[in-house]
Structure formats: C-alpha cells, structure tokens
Image (cartoon, grey):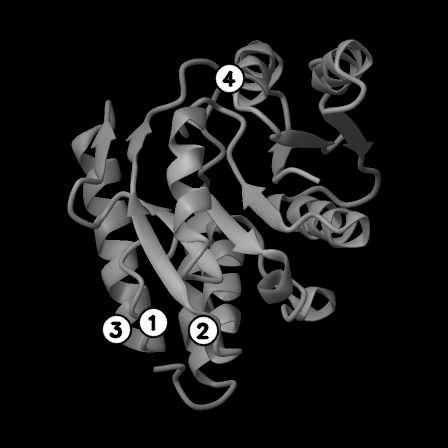
C-alpha cells in the first residue's frame, strides 16, 4: 500500500483538480480528500475525481462542526484504519508542491515525523506580504521559546508521518484547530519520543481562493503554547 496524502478541503474547488493531478503523477501515492461540507462544490468535484481514479483517490465527506483540526483527525483515523505505512498532511491550496513528496518519503527512513520546513537551510516562502513573513517567523520563535520544541517550523502544514508514530498520537484529546493543531501534534510527537526531522520546502502563497487565517486563529495560536507547557515537562 502506497503513501496516503490527506488533503482537507473547504471551498477549494478551483485548486483541487490541479493538486490531484500533481499528486497522482507520483507513482504509488494515494489521496484522501476530507471535505468539510464545502458550499462551493469541492466535495462534488472530489467525488468526480475519485470516480476517475477509483484505486488511488477517495473522499471522506465530513458533517458536524467544521475545522482544520477536526478534518485532519477524521482523516488520520481513516488512514490508520487502512494501514498506510506513510501518512502525509498537505494543504489543498497549491501552496505545497507535490514534487517535494519524494524527499519527505526518503527522510522517513530515519525519522518518525518529517516536517516540510520553510525555516531550515534551503527552505523559502514565495509571494507573501511582509506582515505575513514577520508574523509566521515570530510565531514559530514564540512557540519554541515557550514549549521547548526544537523544530524550526512548528506551524508547517506539509508533513509526513510513519504510521507507528501517528498511532501514538492522542487524537481523541487533541483540543486545538488550525495552525494550533499542527503545533499541538508536533509537541505530542516530541513528547512521545518520536524522531522529528525537517526537510526544506518552497512554500507558495495560494493561487486561488481566500486565506482562512483569522483573528480567532491567531488568538488560539497565542494561547496554545502556554497550555502545552502546563501539561508537564517540556519535551526536550
């Protein structure tokens, strides 16, 4: 069974066809689209793509409360149940290049969680305004200072898990969403003794649609590191 890429979607119809094509161009990769009830028809397009690629692309239609973290938890449970050896998290907005996946897979030979990093040597960000660059870099420094995490890009949404490592994650008690969900999983992985590696990537601003960054997302991201630090010893 090939690596499974989990792609959470909410109003990503304009991006999904191109992303699916890029992913399916990589041999053995399988795709799970987790649609969060998109009103723009993303879920219906995903069903069409699944019908055209029945052995490599599937769709999970979520109901109930919306959220990136909730979508990922459902997708991860599905991935663990089907036994995929490598499980990838990836944004649907074309900010992550599918061509980088083989480098993440290669790094999985020596690590349990591989982060596609913008902040290690060779990593970079394209087409972001200055305020986004400053906010993202400052957020990662803030997270590391409070939690003791050593990963330089704790908020990257492009990452690859070995199944054995993801199976250790307490998905039933993850409380955060958005970028905070990514930080919380990184913290839990480090606390569980997982080997974390970072592979440089080029992150590009979304081509279509609207960013889902909001004031509430920023506020949650500011509070989460303190909650994590309060759970116990820092995972150094």
Whether residues under marks 1 and 2 lie with C-beta atoms below 8 angstroms apart, the answer is yes
Image vertical order of residue 127 relative to residue 170, above or below: above
As drawn, is 163 to the left or to the right of 61? Answer: left
Q: Secondary structure at mark 4?
A: helix
As drawn, is 212 to the left or to the right of 46? Answer: left
| Mark sitting earlier along the chain (1/2) | 1
- What number is the disc on residue 149? 1
Displayed quadrant of residue 75? top right
Q: CA distance from mark 1 to mark 2?
A: 8 Å
- What number is the disc on residue 190? 2
- What number is the disc on residue 171? none
**Front-lying residue, 215 or 175:** 175
Whole-percent x, y for residue 216 in the image: 49, 49
Task: Say which residue label 3 marks.
Answer: 145
| Mark sitting earlier along the chain (4/1) | 4
Q: Secondary structure at mark 1?
A: loop
- Which residue does the image show at 19% across and 45% down from the upper left? 134
């Amino acid at each position: 069974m090939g690596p499974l890429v989990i792609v959470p979607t909410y109003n990503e119809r304009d991006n999904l066809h191109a992303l699916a094509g890029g992913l399916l161009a990589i041999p053995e990769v399988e795709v799970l689209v987790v649609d969060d009830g998109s009103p723009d028809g993303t879920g219906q397009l995903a069903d069409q793509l699944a019908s055209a690629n029945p052995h490599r692309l599937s769709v999970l239609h979520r109901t109930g409360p919306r959220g990136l973290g909730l979508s990922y938890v459902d997708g991860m449970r599905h991935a663990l149940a089907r036994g995929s050896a490598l499980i990838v998290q990836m944004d649907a907005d074309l900010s992550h290049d599918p061509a980088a996946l083989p480098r993440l897979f290669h790094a999985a030979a020596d690590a349990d969680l591989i982060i596609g990093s913008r902040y290690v040597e060779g990593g970079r960000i394209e087409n972001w305004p200055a305020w986004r660059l400053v906010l993202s870099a400052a957020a990662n420094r803030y997270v590391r200072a409070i939690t003791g995490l050593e990963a330089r890009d704790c908020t990257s949404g492009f990452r690859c898990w070995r199944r054995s490592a993801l199976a250790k994650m307490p998905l039933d008690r993850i409380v955060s969403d958005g970028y905070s969900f990514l930080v919380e999983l990184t913290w839990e992985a480090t606390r569980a003794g997982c080997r974390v590696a970072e592979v440089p990537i080029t992150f590009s601003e979304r081509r279509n649609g609207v960013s889902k960054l909001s004031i509430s997302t920023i506020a949650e991201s500011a509070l989460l590191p303190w909650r994590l630090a309060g759970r116990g010893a820092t995972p150094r």
